[in-house]
Image (cartoon, grey):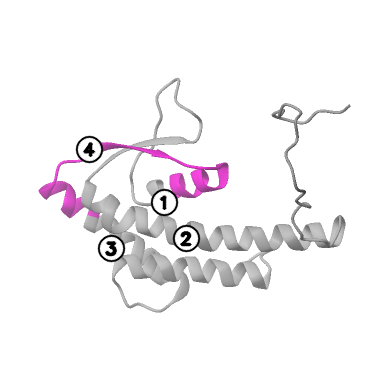
């Protein structure tokens, strides 16, 4: 798999298995199963589009990682994501059938996003441990309330 660590290879395998689940297929070969799964999902989408009208959906994603993943899923299934000028960069629009969103796209996105987030969090913690400091504790909580006005952003006094 080129320059992919063993941990990353396990994550890729998990993500492919998730897609296979949503495609309702039982093929087992790694890459082949993922391609078969994607094709089955595209066929399912085409069938739904013949029986159900596609409508415009707006998805507001919480971060760039989630947005990138969501856009990749849309494009994998032949959908064309977009946003209107003036919309936030984390907003993704797509015209698709409600059944596909509810039965495949959104549940698959949530599961894959959960796995990816978990992996990224573990990698981030490991890097911070090794390069910065090993203390994972939250900040100290003190009694009382700070009477100074809250600032957004960082200030250096």
Q: Which badge, 1 or 2, comes first in the chain's sequence?
A: 1
Residue count near mark 2 (Cα–Cα under 10 Å), binned few <14, some 14–19, many ≥20: many
Query: Of circles 4 and 1, which is in front?
Result: 4
Q: Is residue 29 above or below residue 43?
A: below
Q: Which mark is residue 112?
A: 2
Determine the residue positioned at 22% across, 46% down. 97
Q: Which badge, 3 or 1, comes first in the chain's sequence?
A: 3
Give the Cα distance between marks 4 and 2: 24 Å
Q: Which badge, 3 or 4, comes first in the chain's sequence?
A: 3
Tag 4–tag 2 contact (CB < 8 Å): no
Give the Cα distance between marks 3 and 1: 14 Å
Tag 4, which secondary structure? strand
Q: Position of residue 65 (x, y in %)?
A: 56, 47
Tag 2, which secondary structure? helix
Q: Position of residue 43 (x, y in %)?
A: 23, 57
Q: Which residues are magenta?
A: 45-72
Q: Nearer the viewer, residue 94 or 58?
A: 58
Give the Cα distance between marks 1 and 2: 10 Å
Give the Cα distance between marks 3 and 4: 22 Å
Query: Of circles 3 and 1, which is in front?
Result: 1
Tag 3–tag 2 contact (CB < 8 Å): no
Residue at the disc numbered 4? 55
């Amino acid at each position: 798999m080129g320059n992919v660590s063993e941990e990353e290879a396990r994550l890729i395998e998990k993500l492919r298995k998730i897609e296979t689940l949503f495609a309702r297929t039982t093929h087992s070969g790694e890459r082949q199963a993922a391609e078969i799964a994607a094709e089955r999902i595209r066929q399912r989408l085409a069938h739904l589009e013949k029986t159900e009208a596609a409508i415009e959906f707006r998805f507001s994603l919480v971060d760039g990682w989630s947005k990138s993943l969501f856009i990749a899923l849309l494009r994998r299934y032949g959908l064309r994501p977009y946003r209107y000028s003036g919309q936030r960069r984390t907003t993704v629009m797509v015209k698709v059938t409600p059944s596909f969103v509810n039965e495949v796209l959104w549940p698959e996105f949530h599961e894959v996003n959960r796995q990816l987030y978990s992996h990224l969090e573990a990698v981030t913690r490991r890097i911070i441990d090794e390069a910065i400091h090993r203390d994972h504790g939250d900040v100290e909580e003190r009694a009382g309330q700070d009477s100074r006005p809250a600032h957004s952003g960082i200030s250096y006094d």
